[in-house]
Amino acid sequence: MDYDLELERARAAIRKNKAKTVLVQLPEGLKPLGAKIVMNLEKGTGAEVHLWAGSCFGACDIPKVKGYDLLIQWGHNEMRP
């Protein structure tokens, strides 16, 4: 299955926030794409991007880590207001 990961939108957020270190959090179903996502974001921004390997049960499941300028979370469904 193909996903629209909106990688350009993520790169724009990294550049806008001048983030040097970024943490990417993915649900289990998207973790196989993690390495490609990280490489894409690093190449397009120069930021150091890490992949959170812990669990992710939704947008409220925020990793309790410090030292990152930006956290980017992905999900399977479009977020609706």
Image (cartoon, rainbow, N blue to C red):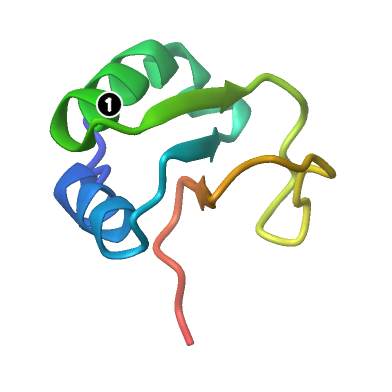
| Residue 36 visible (yes or no) | yes
**Left or right of residue 66: residue 6:** left
Q: Which residue does the image show at 38% across and 12% down from the upper left?
A: 35
**Left or right of residue 74: residue 65:** right
**Left or right of residue 60: residue 12:** left
Q: Which residue does the image show at 68% across and 19% down from the upper left?
A: 53
Is residue 75 depicted above or below 43 in this figure? below
**Left or right of residue 57: residue 16:** left
Is residue 29 depicted above or below 69 in this figure? above
Question: Horizontal and vertical percent for residue 15?
Answer: 24, 54
Q: Nearer the viewer, residue 70 or 38?
A: 70
Question: Horizontal and vertical percent for residue 59?
Answer: 66, 59
Q: Nearer the viewer, residue 68 or 81?
A: 68
Q: In the structure shown, which secondary structural element does the residue marked by tag 1 occupy? A: helix
Q: Which residue does the image show at 41% across and 40% down from the upper left?
A: 20
Where is the N terminus found, in terms of image quarters?
top left
What is the crowding at mark 1: few (fewer than 14 residues within 10 Å), some, or many (at least 20)? some
Q: Which residue does the image show at 55% across and 23% down from the upper left?
A: 51
Q: Nearer the viewer, residue 10 or 33?
A: 10
Q: Which quadrant of the figure has residue 68?
A: top right
| Residue 1 visible (yes or no) | no
Q: Residue beneath label 1, please?
A: 42
